[in-house]
Every structure is written in C-alpha cells, then in structure tokens.
Image (spheres, helix red, strand yellow):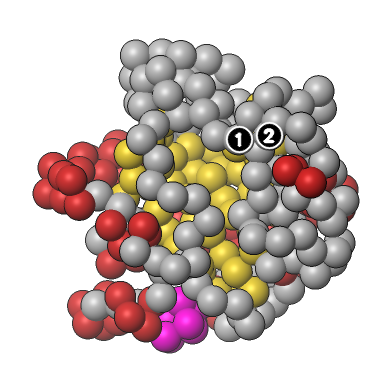
Amino acid sequence: MLENLGVDKNLLSQDEKTALREKGYISLGKLLSDEDLKRISQRINTLINEEQDQMGSELFDSPYIRHPKEAGADRLADLVNKGPIFDRIYTHPRLLAAISYVLGEDIKLSSLNYRAAKPGQGAQKLHADWHESVPEGDFKVCNSIWLIDDFTSQNGATRVVPGTHKMGRLPEEVIQDPWDSHPEEVLCTAPAGTVFVVNSHTWHGGTTNHTNEYRRCIHSYFCRGDQPQQTDQVKFIRKDTMNRLDPAVLALLGV
C-alpha cells in the first residue's frame, strides 16, 4: 500500500530517523505552500460557518477519543469527507514515511481533525494519546501537526518532552501535576506550512494562546493496522469521497 502512495525508506534522512527514534518527534519542514494555506483557510472558514455548534461532533461521538470536548479550542472533524484540499494532509509521502517508521508499514488513518486554540486559552496538560503506557517499540499511535498559522512561544505552540516515549510511563504516573511546565519540555515553534510528526506516546500538550488571534492547525492522526480508528472510516466514508480516492488511499483509510 505505502509503495503505491510514493513512500520509500529514502524519504527520511538518517538524522530524521534518529530524532524520531530518540526524541520522539521531528519537523518535516514546510510541506504546505502559502497558496495551499490560503485555500485550506478558506475551506476551514466555510466549514465553521456551515457547522457552527456542531463543529467536531464526529470526533466527540467517538468511543476512542482520548480528550473530551475542550472549551479552550474549536474543532472540526472528519476532514477526509470535507474536501480534496485536505487529502495531502494524510497522504503526503514524507509524512507516511515518518509515521511508518514509528508504527511499521501496517498503518491506517485514525482521524483527520482541525484544532484552533482560542485567544487566552488552549492549554492542555502533558499527556500521551493512548489510554495506557506501552513498552518502547510497541507503539500504537502517531500524530502529525500541520501548522495553518505560525506556531510561536506566545500563541499556544505544542510542547513536547523529548524521549518520554521510551519511558513506558504516562505523565500522571511520574509527575505530580501534568499541567505544570516540565523542565525538559520543548516548544514546537515554526512558520505556517510546517509539519511536525510526534510519536503519540511522547508526552505533549498545547500551551496557552496569549495573543488575540486563533492558533490553528490540522492533525492527521494514525494508528497501527490492528487498532481501532478514532473516526471509523467505514461508518463515516461518503460515496463521493470513495469515488474520488485511489484504492491505495482507501486502503490507508481502512475501507
């Protein structure tokens, strides 16, 4: 399947592989052009106006969601079915090379969601995106963060604690208050269009947006092929979506 999507082992440098293995996250650089960002923003604004108080309902109805609906951020969910503009956000070969380096070649998209930290809000406790600790190498999930806006130290950039994916422990098992700053945490700051890949067992969380603007991103979140999806694509996939996607992409969706 991955070969049919243009993925091969040479798409990641040795340094990138080492960082994923040892630190638990990497930046893939800017994979979205300014024109891409403009078109994605336009589509997001349309969806927000259309869905209003139903925004993100597909996500929060899922029995596998790790985080309940949060007052400090707006969400959109099930973006697979909401326009071809979002297709590359879960099919880009460099992205899939990084995800499969963490999880192995048998992967599927778990969910494709938008998150926008509201002004003055958006902070999250340190967490892993799995309900229990796992031993190093038995990773179940891996996430990517596609920056629609610049991520800065002031607007709620994601924080990560490098190497914690290797501990086999959840934050609440180790630290007294996961809401506190961690002495080893690093902020994922970068210009809009950049993509971070984060082993989801690495401790991470959003920080407070201290600006007057929303801080926006899209998460393409993956799981191992033997794990349940956050968004059940068999349940949600639309006929028009199936008709426009290649068989290899449908296989990546698990349908």
Tell me where residue 192 appears, x and y as whole percent. 47, 31
Circles 2 and 1: CB atoms closer than 8 Å: yes
Label located before the other in sequence (2 or 1): 1
Q: Give the percent coordinates (x, y) of residue 147.
A: 48, 37
Residue 18 is at least partly visible in this image: no
On screen, residue 159 versus residue 148, left or right, reads right
Q: Secondary structure at mark 1?
A: loop
| Residue 99 x, y percent position in the rendering | 66, 62
Please provide the residue range marked out in magenta: 246-255
**x%, y% of residue 48?**
20, 43
User: Which quarter of the rendered picture does the C terminus lie within?
Assistant: bottom left
The amino acid marked with disc number 2 is: Pro
Q: Is residue 66 above or below residue 236?
A: above
The residue positioned 71% from the left and 61% from the top of the image is 132
Camera-side residue of 159 and 173: 173
Overall secondary structure of the magenta section:
helix
Q: In the image, is residue 159 above or below residue 83?
A: above
Residue 150 lies within the magenta run: no
Question: Which residue is identified by label 2?
Answer: 178
Q: Which residue is label 1 attached to? A: 125
Which type of secondary structure does the marked residue at label 2 adopt?
loop
Q: Is residue 80 left or right of residue 134?
A: left
Which quarter of the figure has residue 118?
top left
Image quadrant containing the N terminus: bottom right
Q: Residue, x 84% and y 56% (percent of image)?
A: 168
Q: Along the line of sight, which residue is nearer the eye, 108 or 193?
A: 108
